[in-house]
Image (cartoon, rainbow, N blue to C red):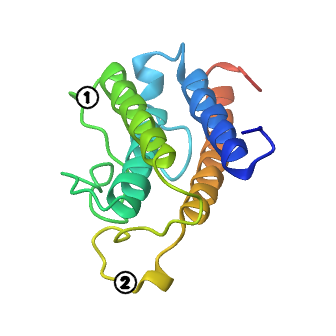
Amino acid sequence: MTLSAPDALMAAYLDFYRSTVLRKLDGLSDEELRRSRVPSGWTPLELLKHLAHVEMRWLRWGFSGEDVKEPWGDMECRGGRWRVGPEETFEEVRRFFEEQCDRSRAVVAAARWEDRAATLGGKELPEEERPALGWILFHLLQEYARHTGHLDIARELADGNTGE
């Protein structure tokens, strides 16, 4: 398989963004990881936890149909504000993020681009209404691209670092 194949290209871009998100957070103090610099109030650590849950929701819960304990555990309530408890450390959230990314890679490796989501998060939908893996991966890519841009701004405001 070459990097020009859509599935290989998508996997490479997702891994690029996954590592970029972590690189943007490296070196920030605990205070900066928990500090919001934007009017909406999210913090860099909350964003990392959100991305871990995005991986879980779309690929394990939605695509594979796995029973997951807290698919919306990154939010105060479904569709609500992101949250990280004061007892949660950066190392714990990072480890959770990395575990979800590893599990996502395994789900993708075991499926085909055109395979359809099993349940899309417990919803009973006709097969033709469930998104294909390719669609889900494109959705994840745009989610990462958007949030990596958010982290660019947060990092620049925190300590002046840009474009890393």
Query: What residue is disc 2 on?
Result: 125
Residue 71 spot, x, y in % from top left: 28, 55
Q: Amino acid at mark 1?
A: Glu
> Relative to the observer, which residue lies in front, 35 or 75?
75
Q: Is residue 70 visible?
A: yes
Tag shown at residue 88: 1
> Is mark 1 in CB contact (under 8 Å) with mark 2?
no
User: Which residue is painted at 31% across and 77% down in the image?
Assistant: 123
Q: Is residue 154 visible?
A: no
User: Which residue is painted at 72% across and 39% down in the image?
Assistant: 1
In the figure, residue 78 lies in which quadrant?
Answer: bottom left
> Relative to the observer, which residue lies in front, 7 or 25?
7
SS class, disc 1: loop
Q: How many marks?
A: 2
Residue 31 spot, x, y in % from top left: 41, 21
Q: Amino acid at mark 2?
A: Leu
Residue 154 spot, x, y in % from top left: 61, 34
Tag shown at residue 70: none
In the figure, residue 114 lies in which quadrant?
Answer: bottom right
Between the residue at mark 1 and the residue at mark 2, the CA separation in whole angstroms equals 36 Å
Q: Which residue appears farthest toward the front when viewing the image?
A: 1
* Lateral position of residue 96 relative to residue 129, left or right: left
Q: Label 1 neighbourhood size at 10 Å, few (<14), some (14-19), many (20+)?
A: few
Q: Which residue appears farthest toward the right when viewing the image?
A: 4
Residue 92 spot, x, y in % from top left: 30, 24
Q: Label 2 neighbourhood size at 10 Å, few (<14), some (14-19), many (20+)?
A: few
User: Which residue is painted at 71% across and 21% down in the image?
Assistant: 160
Whether residue 124 is situated above or below residue 26 in the rendered picture: below
Q: Is label 1 or label 2 in front?
A: 2
Q: Quadrant of the C terminus?
A: top right
